[in-house]
Structure formats: structure tokens, C-alpha cells
Amino acid sequence: MGEGPRYIGVAERRARLGLRHRLAGAARAAHPVEVADSLVALHGTDPATVYLAVGARLAEPAKTVAETERALYEDRALVRMHGMRHTVFVFPAGLTAVVHASTGLAVAARERATLVKHMAAAGAPDAAWLAEVEQSALAALARRGQATAAELAEDEPRLRERFVYGVGKSYEGMHTVSTRLLRVLGVEGKVVRGRPLGSWTSSQFRWAVAPEHPELDVAGAQAELLRRWLAACGPATEADLKWWTGWRVTEVRRALAAIGAQAVSLDDGTGYVAEGDADPVPEPTEPWAALLPALDPTAMGWQRREWYLAPELWPSLFDRSGNVGPTVWWNGRVVGGWAQRGDGEVVWRLLEDLGGGERRAAEAAIAAEAERLRGWVGAARVTPRFRTPLERELVG
């Protein structure tokens, strides 16, 4: 009988995480684009998360804000756009066409149909009117370069049209056409979020016309996205892959076959790695600690998280919708949480009993990371958009 799939245990999975996610000391990156390339996507729903996720992984974190802003708004090497599961992410520019074809097209079709349906239910103008307003708004945005929704409405007043969105639903509310239309255009890959109105922690953005990218075959784009993600996050189960991408099981399986993914044995069942990536991975050369922000792509990377996050810690570290808060890591697993107080102090708490010498080593390394974080954040104050019980308690 031939040998079965190679077993990859928890220790090796944590080693892969530390090295490939640029968290172990020697693996830290030189530039924000390297961080995004290594992780495939940075969660962008909360603007500060992007910077905090980058800063945790740079060898010289003092460069975080300036270099990330340059990559986002000047070089356009990073692009903030809708992606998997209709979530806002920051991607390397070279990946935008892949993301758009592999996940954006299907979501965009649903979003536009929903908008037209809800406008009709509210007695608002029809799809033809909406298409006319859209073309006018895109032309105005192209002329301006970047603009807020309010600025675009100066050029195209019909964007101010108001209607009741979601009539009869729990989320019913009064919306302007600009609010819903710009959201749809973002998912369709026609516009992207530009420079914020305030500092790097601001959630008020300008809009810009999306950069040109080729139209790719959907199946081919799905295969490429899955290959990239497995290289960063493998091994992962089929359930992990379905959850992260938002695809149907049939699409996940088709992409796995297309890239020649290799099956491996995990504690929670069969997992997959990219072709040629099943060989053992060495441990990082030095112990490492990290303070990762709310919604960090490492903490949110897998559906099954027991191998790096003990279930008993979840009530303290997640909100009611399943969004993870700021986490403290030690050698590939979550051991606590952290927060920033109003005076700028970075405070943290261990939730796991590490015991003895390991606890002392962990505490010293975590304290150094907290000081490192406070140093580059400076006068900025960061409050997660989705607050968790431990974060609220630490702030006091």
C-alpha cells in the first residue's frame, strides 16, 4: 500500500504562520507591498486595521504610515476594493483583476439586482435612470480625479435622490442614490476608495475611478487566487477555503483540481497545500510575539481556528457578529488581547496560563511589542470599529 497524505501538526502550522505571515522577527518585511503580497489581502473595513497590520510586520515600523499612504494613494501599488464575501480589502495592484473576476463579478451582479429591486419597491426611478446617473457620475469622477459623494452630487444632482431602502425589512432605512450606487460601483470594480478626508485612522473616504485591468476568465482567476492563498495560508480545509472565498463548494473543488493542490492530513480532517508545498517547514529561529489589530487577516484567515485560538478565549476576543478584536500572539497562537487607552498607552492582558519561564519570556517579548507599537502610532488614537469585551475592559 502507498503512503497516505503527509500529516501536518499544529506546531508546523504555527511555524508556517509565523514565517509566511511576516510575524516572526527574521521574517518581517521591508515594505507594505511585501506584507500585502505575503498575506494576499489586508482587511480594509476598518481603515486603521490596514496600517496596524502592516506595522506589526515591518522590520522598521516607523515607516508604516508614510509608506502605506504612498503605496495606496501615490504609487497605487496597493488598492482598497471590495473582494471576498463582499468585504473591503486592500490588495496588491497586480491582484485586482484576479479578485474582480474570481469573486467580484458574482457579488456585483447580486448587488445591482438588489439595488434596482429595492428602488422599485420604494417607487424610486428605474434601472435605465440609474444607468444614466451612473455614467454621469463616473464622468464627473474622472474629471475630478478624486471626490467625495457630496462633491460628485454637485456635478450630478440626481445622486441626492432619496428612497427607502429595504422596505419592510429589519434594515429598512432612508438612503441616497449616491450611497447605494457608489457601493455597487465599488463591487463592480468601477470605482475604488481614495485618500481619506482625515488622518490614516479616518473612515471618510474620497472615491476614484478604478485603475484599468484585464478581464480574466472566472475559473482561471479562481484558480490563481486559491493558489496564492494556499501559498500564504496552507494547509487549509475545504471548509476554510469556502468560507474565505465565499465560493460554492463546486468552485472550490474545481480550483483545487486546477492548481494541483496536494492533500495533507490535519487534526481536523483533510487539508490542502499548494502543489510542491507539502514538505516540512522549520520552526522560526527565535521565539516571537505580535500585537495584531482587530480584523487582522491572520486572526481571520481560517474558519476553523482551534489550532491557533483556543475556543475558551473567543467570548473575550470576538464581538457578537464574529469579528475578532485586537489579539496578542506568542509563537503562533493567540494568548491574549490588547487595547490603546485615551492617553496613548498600549495595554494588554494574557488570557492563557503559559506557566513558569515561558510566561516570563512571553511577557518580556509582548511588552517590547507594545512599546514598539506605541512608538510608531505616536499621537494617533485607534479604536476598533467592532469592539469586543476585552478591548472595552482594557480601555476602562
Image (tube, rainbow, N blue to C red):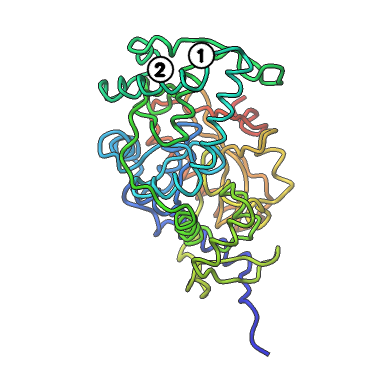
Q: Is residue 53 visible?
A: yes
Q: Is residue 18 visible?
A: no
Outermost residue toward the right? 312
Task: Give the quadrant of residue 193.
Answer: top left
User: Nearer the N terminus, badge 1 or badge 2?
Assistant: 2
Toward the viewer: 291 or 365? Answer: 291
Q: Is residue 221 left or right of residue 270?
A: left
Q: Position of residue 162 (x, y in %)?
A: 53, 10
Secondary structure at badge 1 equals: strand
Toward the viewer: 32 or 136? Answer: 136
Q: Which residue is mark 1?
A: 176
Q: Position of residue 341 (x, y in %)?
A: 53, 26
Q: Is residue 136 left or right of residue 224?
A: left
Q: Residue at x 33, y 44 (%)?
A: 213
* Picture disc at residue 149: 2
Amino acid carrying mark 2 in the image: Ala
Asked if the residue at tag 2 contacts the one at tag 1, i.e. Cβ–Cβ closer than 8 Å, the answer is yes
| Image quadrant occupied by the N terminus | bottom right
Q: Position of residue 338 (x, y in %)?
A: 57, 37
Secondary structure at badge 2 equals: helix
Q: Is residue 181 left or right of residue 353?
A: left
